[in-house]
Amino acid sequence: MKKFSLYILLLFCSFNYGQELNLPVWTQYLADNDFVISPTYAGIGDNFKVRANGLTQWVGIKNAPDNQSLYADFRIGNQTGVGLSLYNDRNGNTRQKGAKFSFAHHIILDYKSKQYLSFGLSYNINSFRIDIENFQPTEEMPIIDPSITDDRSRSNNNFDVGFLYRWNRFYFSFNANNILRKDIDDFVGVEPNQLLNYQAYTGYVIASKHNKNIEFEPSVFFQMFDSDNRSATDINFKYRRFNRDGDYYWVGGSYRFLNDQFLKPLNVGPMAGIMKNRLYLAYSYQLTINDLSGYNSGTHVLTIGLDFMSGISNCACTKGTSYRKYKNNGNNRN
């Protein structure tokens, strides 16, 4: 009975998050893909960057959430970038699909001190659907309600806005997501119409004093939902090492906690990735650290990607914060 209660609680919490029509944020952004966090990163770094993610959450629990997503961004001018995000999310008998179309513009605040400011905007379209074809009779309800004759679905249109400030190897971004209220439908019952949530992401790239091919990158990600002020924080750390050709590998870890349970771990796990000849592969594992840990084996995220068409823009405001990555790609932007 205890296991069943925990299972129901887990699915209920997941359903509430799913109703809010957001791309689920785990560690995808740490796979050298800051564009997951904010549209302001569109066009920064290599001219064309593609990342595909597969996320399997709470492995071991039947009908647990499963997500696939694709991110692509590129420059359309020396100081302007555009991007596209697509995702498909399944949680039990609920389905979500969505797309984001993003635009970013980057300006130089001070060339000598390497201060840059970026602004971003995303248009979002999402659909939420309940798969009634999977409904099965139970002992408590031996006959399915005959009034349920079709899948229940709903679409939502919204916008994200944000800014990004960079000073040499320091970066800070702030985003307001889903800034419009959502139209609600009577068939859903109790449903939040305020989807606004805030995300802040900051970090610093530290170059090793002893080896010019090594970098360290501590970072923090914060997210808060406006509807009920629930929030969570990720504390991350990455170690990155380059070779002579500019290829690199990295290892790191992420530690997530709810802010009303300060520093009490919710998820924790290792990450690793490699870039070779513009091909990218990364994997992260997040272990759930709470009462549900005995009923699942954690969350797995696999990322594959491709970076290409580098060296088109000579504007310093489109360089990334990793010194070695953009020194070796021929852009001459450092």
Image: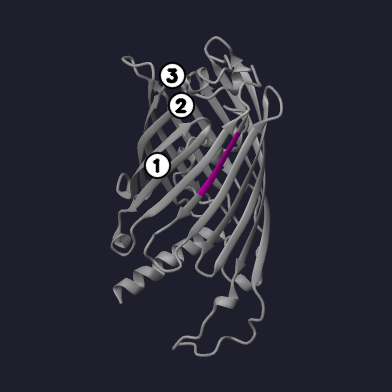
Disc number for residue 244: 3
How far, Cα to Cα, is label 2 from label 1? 27 Å
Residue mark closest to the camera, 2 vs 1? 2
Disc number for residue 247: 2
Task: Judge left or right: residue 231 versus residue 94.
Answer: left
Q: Which residues are magenta?
A: 49-53
Q: Is residue 118 magenta?
A: no
Mark 3 / mark 1, whichever is N-terminal: 1
Task: Judge left or right: residue 266 versus residue 244.
Answer: left
> Residue at point 44% right, 66% down?
11
x then y, percent, for residue 173: 53, 32
Residue type at mark 1? Asp
* Secondary element at tag 2: loop
Residue sitting farthest toward the top: 112
Mark 2 / mark 1, whichever is N-terminal: 1
Q: Quadrant of residue 43?
A: top right
* Secondary element at tag 3: loop
How far, Cα to Cα, is label 2 from label 3? 7 Å
x then y, percent, for residue 226: 53, 50
